[in-house]
Image (cartoon, rainbow, N blue to C red):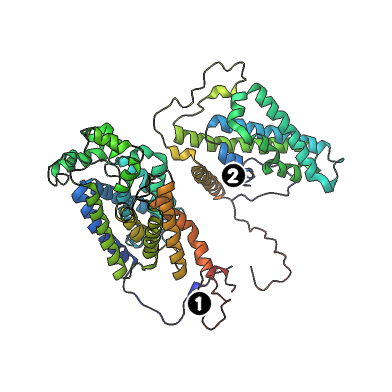
Amino acid sequence: MSELQLNSSQASSPWTNNPVLVQLLGLSPVLAISTTLVNGLGLGISTALVMLLSSVTVSTLRTKINQRWRFTWYLLITASYTTILDSLLQWFYSPLHRELGIYIPLICCNFAVLIRLEVHAINHHWRSALKDAALTGSGFIVAIVALSSLRELIGRGTLLADWQLLLPVSQATAVISKGSNTTEYFDFALLLPAAFILLGLLIAGKNLIDCKLNENAPVTAREIEPIKRARVTGGL
Amino acid sequence: MQTQPSAIGISSPMQHSQRSTGRLMLLVIAACIPGVATATWYFGFGVLINIMLAASMAIILEACALKLRGRDMRQHLSDNSALVTAVLFGIAIPPGASWWLVAMGIFFAIVIAKHIYGGLGQNLFNPAMCGYVLLLLSFPVEMTSWHIPNDALVDGSSFSAFSLAGLRQSLLLSMPVFGSAQMSSPDSIDGLAMATPLIEFKMAGTGALLAAWDAGVSLFSRDSGAAWELVNMGYLCGGLFLIYKRIISWHIPCAIIATVTMMSMLFYAPDSSAVYGTPYLHLFGSATMIGAFFIATDPVSAATTVRGKIYYGIIIGLAIYGIRVWGSYLDSIAFAVLLGNFCAPALDYLCRPRIYGHGKKSRSVPTTEVEP
């Protein structure tokens, strides 16, 4: 079973420390946007880009950033990159931008991004921060792609429909075929409860794979730090 | 923190019951018989076929889930709880539903809503209603078309829904692989042969029903209102039997029925054009009876303290009336019961009984908070 790593000097791993499947961070855009694979890819790539750029920036500026105000700096940096990305998307990918809506501006306060800055980028060299952000971002993309392709497949019966949204506007000549599909599919998968249920099943699947992988590994006792409390009346 | 229910939860005057869970569940199923039989008599074999299909699938799925979870299959299958879920689910979905609809709903009910939460006794929500709501949200068209055998639609023929031709047609509707059921006028009936008179009444507000009457479609051979009254009377009798047998307590059904009656009396306006309906229509022209006696009283997902049960019933009653009258869904038992299930843990927490011999402030502590 994978443990949540919040304080490591190593770069984060996209499997054992996946931001969506293990850390369960930044879930609100993941659950809301993952109705189609195109939306999922759009949001995943955008989030990963912001993560990459702000990680490198924070680790470059880490000697200049005042420890006391570091979260303000994180937010300023992520917000700047998010604003730039938002404008670029609006310019080059306006239909996709319309689909993603509020969730692009919300990347700037996505905690899956901020936690990488706080845990890794603020006290590592920019190369290490780049590696860490790339791995975490790829983990984020993989998770959101898995969830959104599952939901699109079950809910609409398609996969990567409206793919031309991923092309810049000048090249997207094909007409968007939204709503033309009248065949009935499992609408429930497009609703939010199904997003929670399917994400839960994905996490269960990942844990199952971990269990199978660790079956033959020697069992090592987990070190549990004793919980510090002012007054302990009994064992916890 | 460890819970110690054996040491703390039980005090000395203990009541013994000879009845096992399996027997209780069988009695619940037996109490459904009058209502189901009346529905079959008036509306054909669709309900029975639904129940049979759902029950067989539920037992298979329950066995698979128990096998996967490594539980003792014989012991857990014999508690019959899957059967009760299947019967309630089969009554709730429209007659003439396809087999895959039944399969999907019962899979969600048994596997997702019950076994993923930890099996019987751990499920937060009523499994049958979870399955029903899943289908209603996913397949609104299928879930609102109530197919009635052809003969029942013809004026003057007596008890013709209860015939071999009706049985054949119902079978074909639920399993279209063997050929297609020839419905007399599928277009109009799909949208019109609705669940209950309450729904017809609600639809009448939009003019659809009147238009159909103008087109010469008779909905039922007899007055459908009378048929539904009898079906609801059947469920009422079954519910009273359950209370007599002390399988359910009177608090939840009484609170629900009283709330629905009060609300419909308060808002009833004979001359207004708004669709409110009489109290009688709300009680006997809809699914209120089966909801109040059979669905809301699920011992696992309902509130358990006495005051909690009454508040639980009031919440469900308010939700039933509110969703019916001001909501966009046709009938509201499932949503109201799920809403009540959401509130049940909080109600139980707030309505803990007072400890005997202590002041008004001291309440018994839920076992999960007990420090060893």
**Identity, as a three-letter code, of the amino acid under mark 2:** Leu
| Label 2: element kind | loop
Q: Quadrant of residue B218?
A: top left
| Label 1: element kind | helix
Q: Is residue B315 left or right of residue B212?
A: right
**Identity, as a three-letter code, of the amino acid under mark 1:** Ala
Indicate the position of residue A71 as horizontal and vertical percent values. Answer: 78, 45
Chain letter of disc 1 in the image: B
Whether residue A5 is visible to the viewer of this picture, yes or no, is: yes
Q: Is residue B47 above or below residue B343?
A: above
Indicate the position of residue B253 as horizontal and vertical percent values. Answer: 36, 63
* Between B360 and B210, the one nearer to me in the picture: B210
Residue receiving disc 2: A21
Q: Which mark is residue B7?
A: 1
Q: Residue at x 63, y 59 (%)?
A: A221
Whether residue B196 is visible to the viewer of this picture, yes or no, is: no
Task: State how far apart marks 2 and 1 are (Cα).
Answer: 39 Å
Say how many tags the image has: 2
Indicate the position of residue B139 as horizontal and vertical percent values. Answer: 38, 39
Q: Is residue B321 above or below residue B179?
A: below
Chain letter of disc 2 in the image: A
* Between B348 and A123, the one nearer to me in the picture: B348
